Image: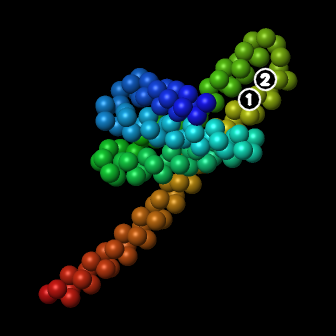
């Protein structure tokens, strides 16, 4: 079960990366991010049956890993985050909403649409919170590192 989930999420993420014309090297890293995000979602959902928390945590990790990979390999963050977020997008749920609307089952369609909106909000919140935390960390860490470097440079003179 674990291996099947890992391989299929990796391949699905890489396939969407190919569709979006992501270069080869970031494609592998994006697939890795998507696989890790899906496994976080899968295990959190199995553990507490709350898909909002699972989606939020997985998208949070996607954003953090995208920042790290972007800094390491000098690519834009969006290359990694778009590919990595694909396994979490509630596309099947949205398809079900449209299917229920076409079948005149409006009450069920509204319920499923509400769930799709909540999951989309969880993805957005996870991405935004991770970005804000990363910027705060970067500002404080780099600010402190500049202070240390200027003191060391001053002492060497």
Instruction: Determine whether, in the image, residue 121 is placed left or right of residue 129.
Output: right
Instruction: Residue 93: give x, y in percent of width and height.
Output: 69, 26
Please name the residue that numbered disc 2 is placed on: 109
Instruction: Please name whichever residue, 6 or 92, is drawn nearer the observer in this view of the structure.
Output: 6
For the point 21% across and 86% down, which residue is it? 154
Q: How crowded is mark 1: few (under 14 residues within 10 Å), some or many (20 or more)?
A: some
- Would residue 54 be seen by someone viewing this image from the given angle? yes
Asked if 115 appears above or below 102 in the picture, the reply is below
- Quarter of the image that includes the C terminus: bottom left
Q: Is mark 1 on a helix, strand or loop?
A: helix
Instruction: Residue 101: give x, y in percent of width and height.
Output: 76, 16
* Callouts 2 and 1 close, C-beta under 8 Å: yes
Please name the residue that numbered disc 1 is placed on: 113
Report, in whole angstroms, how far the alpha carbon at label 2 lies from the one at label 1. Answer: 6 Å
Instruction: Please name whichever residue, 150 or 45, is drawn nearer the observer in this view of the structure.
Output: 45
Asked if 15 appears above or below 132 in the picture, the reply is above
Instruction: Please name whichever residue, 11 or 56, is drawn nearer the observer in this view of the structure.
Output: 11
- Would residue 124 be seen by someone viewing this image from the given angle? no
């Amino acid at each position: 079960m674990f291996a099947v989930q890992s391989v299929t999420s990796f391949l699905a993420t890489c396939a969407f990366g190919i569709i979006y014309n992501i270069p080869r090297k970031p494609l592998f890293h994006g697939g890795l991010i998507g696989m890790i995000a899906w496994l976080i979602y899968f295990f959190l959902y199995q553990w507490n049956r709350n898909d909002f928390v699972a989606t939020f945590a997985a998208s949070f990790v996607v954003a953090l890993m995208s920042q790290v990979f972007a800094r390491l390999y000098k690519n834009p963050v969006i290359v990694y985050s778009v590919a990595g977020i694909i396994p979490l997008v509630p596309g099947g749920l949205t398809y079900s909403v449209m299917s229920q609307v076409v079948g005149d089952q409006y009450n069920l369609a509204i319920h499923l649409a509400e769930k799709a909106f909540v999951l989309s909000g969880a993805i957005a919140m996870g991405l935004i919170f991770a970005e804000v935390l990363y910027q705060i960390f970067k500002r404080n860490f780099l600010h402190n590192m500049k202070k240390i470097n200027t003191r060391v440079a001053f002492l060497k003179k």
